[in-house]
Amino acid sequence: MHSNSGPSPVTDKTILLIIGGGIAAYKCLDLIRRLRERKIRTRVVMTAAAQRFITPLSAGAISGERVLTDLFNLDDEREIGHIRLSREADLIVVAPATADLIAKMAGGHADDLATAVLLATDKPVLIAPAMNPRMWLHPATRRNVAMLQADGIAIIGPNSGEMAERGEAGPGRMAEPLEIAARIEAMLANPTLDPAATAPTPRGSLSGRHVLVTAGPTHEPIDPVRYIANRSSGRQGYAIAAAAAQLGARVTLVSGPVELADPAGVKVVRVQTAAEMLAAVDIALPADAAVFAAAVADWRVADAATEKIKKGKGGTPSLSLIENPDILKTVARRAEIRPALVVGFAAETERVLEHARAKRKSKGCDWIVANDVSPQTGIMGGTRNTVHVITADGVESWPEMAKDAVAEKLVARIAEHLVLGQADV
Ligand code: CTP
């Protein structure tokens, strides 16, 4: 991809990869390889704990450079001190960012080479947290992550899933090397997407504003054990909520059932059904901006059974469906409490722009973020997205990006609109 088409925007960039001490450290070997494929130079610093999981020798062999390990190694210091190390990098990446390393960063510690570099740097920093789900969800980690976000540090993951420890599952798995590499590439190619870089909208630009976001699917019960659902992961809505909080907004995220951790600094209201979602949205209003990213089930079962439906009694049951309330439409058309900016999503599988334009009108929202969710795109449930933003003035098509990056860009536009009063995107 990069070899035939001349130098890519990230060729000749240097990142400083700080490897923390977690079982996910082994994935960094793959990450370094992926970065090499992209012609990104990777200089590696390993914490003492990281060296218990992988050796500096293996990381050095793949990166093609000597790995740095100790602040007090005089040779290392003479050759490249921690100030120079951070100055020479275009981006600093911490992976895996353990609970301990995150706490040290939040507290401004500098007792080894890794933390000293992080404290000395004025470069963008991306962290890829990895830890046990309980540690990730602990209030101390939530606080520390919120502080890092407020400091403008970009975060990728963690993903949900099985942990290395048997029987443990939940948010805490480090993002996959390919996801991290893509995010690094995006940050290097377009530093303005990174919250720590000279962003078009300064941090805190949404402070004093209330942003309401809906996310995830809804579950509509058939009986006590069965429900109608869809493939939405909630990632895009969660990323939007996180990005709005990062810009200082008070954020309420009304979420259907998903396997994602609450974004730092966001009030999350968890619901199951469309009716519950509408009720929670009602309670959360008023808001300055509302983003409806949820994949709300269009129908619910007219008379959900109160007991489990059993086989064999009266043949195959047939479900009679009734339409759910349209939450976006209800809010957009309620003049007395309508947010100044109402943004809807249009998940389509064909004639994307045509359907999305029609949806903007029929729902009465200001902007529609349209995407093609055909199975082959991998968008539904995936980590990347290709969107078109439709306003009264026309369509803006954004390149494929990580859902986090789409969220940052969209929220920056929302901030511009609300704060600077700019008419449209
Ligand atoms: N939406 C909503 N409440 C519903 C259905 C949809 O708030 N009951 C919102 C979604 O959150 C999204 C937008 O409306 O912002 C469009 O959702 P989509 O499912 O694409 O549209 P539908 O109205 O369901 O139209 P269709 O399924 O016919 O494409």
Image: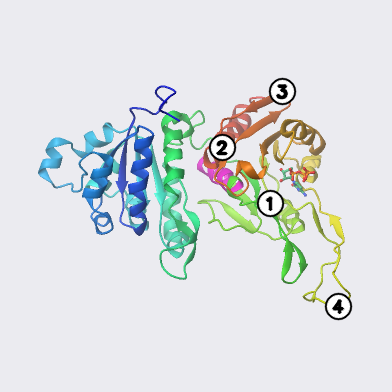
Residue beneath disc 2? 406
Label 1 sits on what residue type?
Ala
Cα separation between marks 2 and 4:
50 Å
Cα separation between marks 4 and 3:
57 Å
Whichever of labels 2 and 4 marks the residue nearer the N terminus, that label is 4
**Magenta-tinted stretch:** 237-250
Whichever of labels 3 and 1 marks the residue nearer the N terminus, that label is 1
- Which quadrant contains ligand 1? top right
Q: Secondary structure at mark 4?
A: loop
Q: Nearer the viewer, mark 2 or mark 3?
A: 2
Residue beneath disc 1? 284
| Dots 4, 3 in contact, CB < 8 A | no
Label 2 sits on what residue type?
Val
Residue depicted at x 37% and y 57%: 99
Label 3 sits on what residue type?
Asp
| Residue 320 appears in view | yes
For the N terminus, which image quadrant?
top left
Label 4 sits on what residue type?
Lys
Q: Secondary structure at mark 1?
A: helix
Left or right of residue 33: residue 261: right
- Which image quadrant is residue 189 in? top left
Residue beneath disc 4? 313
Residue beneath disc 3? 393
Left or right of residue 155: residue 68: left
Cα separation between marks 2 and 3:
20 Å
Cα separation between marks 3 and 1:
30 Å
Residue depicted at x 55% and y 56%: 260
